[in-house]
Amino acid sequence: MTAKRWGGSFPYLLPAQDASARILGTLVFVDATAWAQVSAALDELEDTDPAHPEHDDNLYNRVLHEVETTDGTTHTAWVYIPPAKNHASLRKQYAVIGGEWR
């Protein structure tokens, strides 16, 4: 993934074109009993249709992505990225220097 800022202000992720690209972020573990409520709140925040979490009409799509923590452990995590139809135009926006996402 690579981090960008939409118009210089709204952050978003895109699949990286460079395999060595890294994003520093915060991995949050949600208790399974709270997942339905938490995912509904996040989907609303990210303007994602929960019935269609990967759809061209969403502002962001919720997708599973493999992430690595600083200790080298890998996890499968939900991330929000713009729909694929927008990737080319969004790649022209400003990169977040160093990929700092926290």
Image (spheres, grey):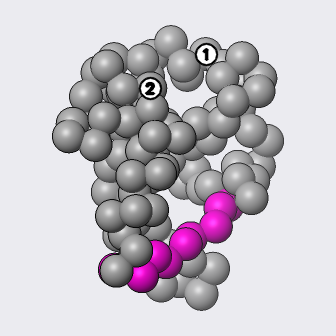
Tell me which corner region of the image, top left, top right, bottom left or bottom right, holds residue 76.
bottom left
The residues colored magenta run 24-32
Tell me which corner region of the image, top left, top right, bottom left or bottom right, holds residue 33.
bottom left
Residue at position x 72%, y 24% in the image: 94
* Badge 1 element: loop
Query: Quick check: can you spot residue 65?
Result: no
Picture mark count: 2
Q: Which mark is residue 59?
A: 2
Residue at position x 28%, y 43% in the image: 50
Q: CA distance from mark 1 to mark 2?
A: 17 Å
* Badge 2 element: loop
Q: For the residue marked with disc 2, what is the amino acid?
A: Leu
Residue at position x 29%, y 21% in the image: 56
Residue at position x 66%, y 23% in the image: 6
User: Residue 25, how many percent across, how many down?
Assistant: 65, 62
Would you say the magenta stretch is mainly helix, strand or loop? loop
Q: Tag 2 or tag 1, which sits nearer the N-term?
A: 2
**Residue that carries the numbered disc 1 in the rendered image:** 92
Depth check: give the residue in front, 79 or 92.
79
User: Residue 27, how many percent across, how many down?
Assistant: 56, 70
